[in-house]
Amino acid sequence: MLDLSHMRAGWRYEARSRSQNAFWLLWAGVASVVAVFILVCLSQFQGWIANIGVGGLVVFSGLSTGAFFGFLFSVPRITTKDSSSTAVISTDADAKAIAKSERLLSSNTNLERVSEWLTTMLVGVGLTQIGSLDDRFVRFSNFLKDNVAVTGNGTSTLPAIGPFLLISGLVAGFIFFYLYTRIYLSPLFQYAERVLSNFGGLKLEAGVPKVQKAAAGLAEARKNPSMKYTSTASEISIDDSLDVIFNLLYEPEGYLQAIDIGNKLAGTPAAKIAQYWYLMAAAYGQKHHALLLSGAPVQELRQARNVVLGACRKAVQLNFNYKARLMSLTNPDSDNNDLQDFEVDNDFLQIVK
């Protein structure tokens, strides 16, 4: 069965992951400022110390420029919402609610436009200047030779290797920040889009009577004030319905009601929320285990398994952090073992690994 401590741990894990990715950038910025200050100080000395300082500044300049280009080339695009999206809007009220929420607050796409414009310009200008690169590298070497303090015998290898250091920094900075943006920063953009969309706050239209009936039963059985409010509320949000499904998973055979309500929500904007699919995977996971214990036909087991795998795929597609949360439900010795039948299921492991 699911429990509150597990759900809270999952939410904390997701929030901590986002915070860590953001703080890494902050600390990288602080470390860069300190490194530049140290290198500038070293460049003021004589001999090999000055060469280390200037060489480090050359590499850092390349890293910084490459990182800028890497970010510029990997800024994620916000796709246009259309009828081909994951969830189906079943009523005119749903469509009006979504349109209203999008008009109230939406993402600023200026960064995307600047990225696209600069990327096109830089590629075009860069291609026209390739022929003059050798001359520019020679001028850069001469600049280092004339301005860097040399060793006692009047020689230095820095002018010769300066262009190589610059190119190495450019390539390393571009590759690192391109991958960092694609892997770590893109989910932050996705999270911001999910917050702005706020599908969970939309008014529920389909399945309201069943949700309220289930909430009334939970309120009576558990003396839950939240469920009592939901059972009598004039309007119910999608978040309220997901909360009811979540609480049903604590009840004996509550997964049956959870599945029934969940199927009613499948054609609403709830299907655009990763938590919806996570809860459906847990509910069908409980059903799969109950069928297994009762010796149900193989066809019923296969059908329940396919639904679990489909729900897991949807949850991971909407939020990759749900991989860890789904995997944590497979331990049969844990209290949170809704997916214990899938601990060694290869298809499931390919989804969550």
Image (tube, rainbow, N blue to C red):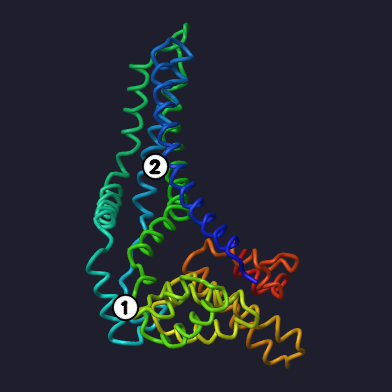
Residue type, mark 2 in image: Gly
Closest to the observer: 268 or 143? 268
Q: Which residue is mark 2?
A: 66
From the top left corner, tell me how far across and down residue 132 is, in percent.
Answer: 30, 39
Quarter location, residue 233: bottom left
Q: How many marks?
A: 2
As displayed, is residue 241 above or below residue 120? Answer: below
| Quarter of the figure that contains the C terminus | bottom right
Please name which of the two marks, 1 or 2, marks the residue nearer to the observer: 1
Quarter location, residue 162: top left
Closest to the observer: 283 or 36? 283
Look at the numbered discs 1 and 2 and tell me whether their residues touch, using CB distance below 8 Å.
no
Q: Earlier in the sequence, mark 1 or mark 2?
A: 2
Quarter location, residue 6: bottom right
> SS class of the residue under badge 2?
helix
Mark 2 burial class by Cα count in 10 Å: few <14, some 14-19, many 20+: many
Q: What separation in Å lies between label 1 and label 2 (alpha carbons)? A: 36 Å
From the top left corner, tell me how far across and down residue 223 is, in percent.
Answer: 53, 73
| Quarter of the figure that contains the N terminus | bottom right
Q: Is residue 252 rendered to the left or right of residue 179?
A: right
Residue occupying the point 40% across, 61% down: 190
As displayed, is residue 72 above or below residue 207? Answer: above
Residue occupying the point 49% across, 46% down: 20
From the top left corner, tell me how far across and down residue 299 is, in percent.
Answer: 68, 92
Q: Which mark is residue 62?
A: none
From the top left corner, tell me how far across and down residue 346 is, in percent.
Answer: 69, 72
Q: Is residue 94 rendered to the left or right of residue 336?
A: left
Residue occupying the point 46% across, 71% down: 226
> SS class of the residue under badge 1?
loop
Q: Which residue is mark 1?
A: 82
Residue type, mark 1 in image: Asp
